[in-house]
Amino acid sequence: MTGSKLFKKDELGQSRYMRLRNRAFKAAVSAHSRVHALIDEPEKGTTTAEYAVVIVAATGFAGLLIAVLKSDAVKGLLSSLVEKALQTS
């Protein structure tokens, strides 16, 4: 590209050079701010993710506990335990 085309102004009064320079500057500023956000707050959002994992695990455990408590073996065990407790008193 020849120098005359690079510095020729468009209808807005900007040369191609200035448009490219401004675009590169904005990209550099954007990349710089992203890097600083990662450096300054690397663990942002981890607490929320940890809560989500705990909630999923607790829900799974609750479902498993309900399934176990509804089983015939556990019902029989609890019934016999209550009957023995009532007989001794």
Image (cartoon, rainbow, N blue to C red):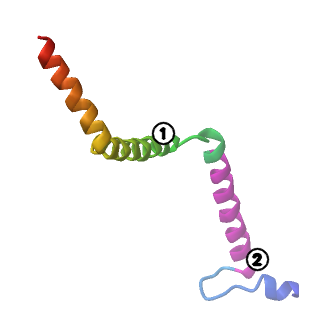
Q: Is residue 76 left or right of residue 16?
A: left
Q: Nearer the viewer, residue 19 or 32?
A: 32
Dominant SS of magenta comes to helix
Relative height, residue 80 to residue 71 (above, below)? above
What's the residue type where badge 2 is placed? Tyr
Instruction: Find the magenta span and give its range.
Output: 15-36
Tell which residue pokes out farthest to the right in this image: 2
What's the residue type where badge 1 is placed? Thr
Q: Is residue 85 left or right of residue 57?
A: left
- The residue shown at (16%, 24%) is 83
**SS of the residue at dot 1?**
helix
Q: Nearer the viewer, residue 13 or 65?
A: 65
- Mark 1 and mark 2 lie on one chain; the one further toward the N terminus is 2
| Disc 1 to disc 2, C-alpha distance | 46 Å
**SS of the residue at dot 2?**
helix
- The residue shown at (66%, 87%) is 10
* Numbered mark located on residue 47 in the image: 1
Callout 1 crowding tier (Cα within 10 Å): few <14, some 14–19, many ≥20: few
Quadrant occupied by the C terminus: top left
Residue 29 horizontal/vertical position (percent): 66, 57
* Numbered mark located on residue 17 in the image: 2
Quadrant occupied by the N terminus: bottom right
Q: How many marks?
A: 2
Residue 56 horizontal/vertical position (percent): 42, 47
Tell which residue pokes out farthest to the top in this image: 89
